[in-house]
């Protein structure tokens, strides 16, 4: 969702570069809507009552060749390669867990390619953003709905 100034509300440097992009590098992640959807589709699924991790490696950007392209220099690190991935995906997973059933429905709808309902839409908004929300999900949704109603009333 883009605000009136044409900027991504999640502070991406350029929302147009983010919109419709099929792949994100881990260094690009700022938890905007498109990036959260990418993370959900690449890494998460619903198994019973739990949102589960499908993989612990970041997908490489596909090229026209048979092997994926790996750009940049490799570096030596004292951390395992999966640690950063688990951190980024774990953050989304924790935020989704805070939304309860709405987060699970969001993951299911995205994985099935169907349009999410209102609650799943609110869950996506709650999960997005550079920081976690301070309010519990139900109160956050209530606050957003009241603000939307107030905006509609002021326009009339």
Image: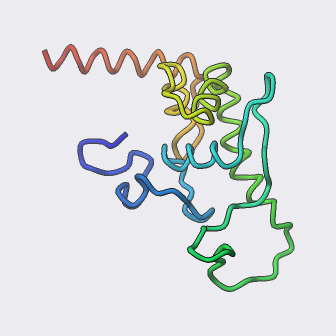
Which residue reaches farthest left? 156
Locate residue 30 relative to residue 13 in the image: left or right.
right
Q: Position of residue 88 (x, y in %)?
A: 69, 52
At 50% from the left and 25% from the top, the residue drawn is 122
In this rendered view, identify the residue nearer to me: 85 or 154. 85
- Check the image and report above or below for 11 versus 140: below
- Check the image and report above or below for 72 versus 103: below
At 79% from the left and 22% from the top, the residue drawn is 49
Q: How many marks?
A: 0
At 42% from the left and 22% from the top, the residue drawn is 144
Q: What is the image's colouring?
A: rainbow
Q: Quadrant of residue 56?
A: bottom right
Image quadrant where one finds the C terminus: top left
At 48% from the left and 27% from the top, the residue drawn is 115
Locate residue 138 relative to residue 59 in the image: left or right.
left
Locate residue 137 relative to residue 152 in the image: left or right.
right
Image quadrant where one finds the N terminus: top left
- Check the image and report above or below for 118 versus 33: above
Q: Position of residue 40 (x, y in %)?
A: 64, 42
Q: Quadrant of residue 13?
A: bottom left
Q: Position of residue 124 (x, y in %)?
A: 53, 33
- Check the image and report above or below for 80 versus 67: above
Q: Position of residue 113 (x, y in %)?
A: 55, 34
């Amino acid at each position: 969702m883009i605000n009136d100034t044409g900027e991504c509300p999640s502070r991406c440097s350029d929302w147009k570069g983010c919109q419709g992009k099929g792949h994100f590098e881990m260094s690009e992640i700022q938890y905007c809507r498109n990036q959260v959807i990418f993370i959900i589709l690449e890494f998460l699924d619903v198994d019973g009552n739990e949102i589960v991790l499908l993989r612990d490696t970041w997908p490489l950007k596909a090229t026209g060749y048979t092997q994926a392209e790996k750009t940049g220099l490799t570096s030596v690190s004292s951390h395992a390669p999966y640690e950063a991935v688990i951190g980024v995906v774990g953050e989304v997973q924790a935020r989704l867990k805070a939304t309860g059933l709405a987060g699970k429905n969001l993951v299911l709808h995205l994985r099935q390619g169907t349009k999410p309902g209102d609650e799943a839409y609110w869950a996506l908004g709650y999960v997005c953003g550079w920081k976690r929300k301070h309010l519990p999900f139900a109160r956050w949704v209530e606050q957003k709905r009241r603000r939307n109603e107030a905006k509609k009333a002021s326009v009339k």
